[in-house]
Image: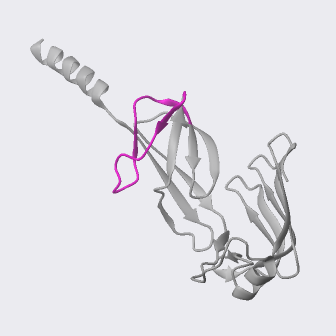
Amino acid sequence: MKLTIFILLFSTISGFSQEIKFNLFLKDSCSNRVENSFSYHLEKNGTEYHITEFDNGTILLPTKGEYELIATEIGETHKIVIDKLINSDTLIKPRIDEYIKMTNVSFTKKASKEELKKLGIIPNYRFMNCEKVCDGIETGYFSNGKIRLKAVFKNGLVIGELKRYYQSGKIKEISNYDKDGVLTKRTLFDENGEVKNE
């Protein structure tokens, strides 16, 4: 009888003290390597939950249920269900990465576009696909398989039109670049398809 009470008491106490854990992994679509993500958080009912175990990127949660996963490293958001004590998800890193070309050249804010071109400051955005410079028509995808971006590239620069999309598949941005890869016009759209900035 005492043993039964002890077992019931122990299981009740341990049931309340069990932590719910979540880890996000990212699969590199170029190398197929899978590694921990350290740049994400979960949200539920207006509360954000961030990594608490930094050595392995684990988030500790108070309850099970539906959460929103914000994977900032790859710019994606997903609804997920936490239904076990140990949970994880794996998302796919995009093949196409965008880099800002760094420079140590000084210039004034009043410098013209032509002066900035001569200094090599613009164009400053370069695109790589699996560590190879983007060339020709390239398309990048979200983890859900929908198009992330599409453009024509020359030596890593966008030439002509660049289209970016939301995870839903709706258009997010249409940008135009000249023959030298310099941005000439950008139009941004909200998720309803309305122009929000031009």
Residue found at the very far top of the displayed protein:
1
Q: Is 21 one of the magenta-colored residues?
A: no
16 in relation to 127, above or below: above
In-front residue for pair 85/181: 181
Q: Quadrant of the N terminus?
A: top left
Residue 43, how many percent across, how many down? 53, 36
117 in relation to 188, above or below: below
Q: Main secondary structure of the magenta part?
A: loop
User: Residue at the location (20% across, 18% down)?
Assistant: 9
- When asked about the image quadrant of residue 179, the answer is bottom right
Horizontal side of 195 relative to 79 (left or right) equals right
Residue 183, how many percent across, how many down? 81, 70
Q: Which residues are magenta?
A: 45-67
Q: Is 63 one of the magenta-colored residues?
A: yes
Residue found at the very far bottom of the displayed protein:
118
53 in relation to 47, above or below: below
Residue found at the very far left of the displayed protein:
2
96 in relation to 191, above or below: below
Horizontal side of 48 relative to 6 (left or right) equals right
User: Residue at the location (73% across, 78% down)?
Assistant: 122
Residue 136, how many percent across, how many down? 84, 80
In-front residue for pair 36/72: 72
User: Residue at the location (74% across, 65% down)?
Assistant: 140
Horizontal side of 18 relative to 6 (left or right) equals right
- When asked about the image quadrant of residue 193, the answer is top right
Residue 73, how many percent across, how many down? 56, 58
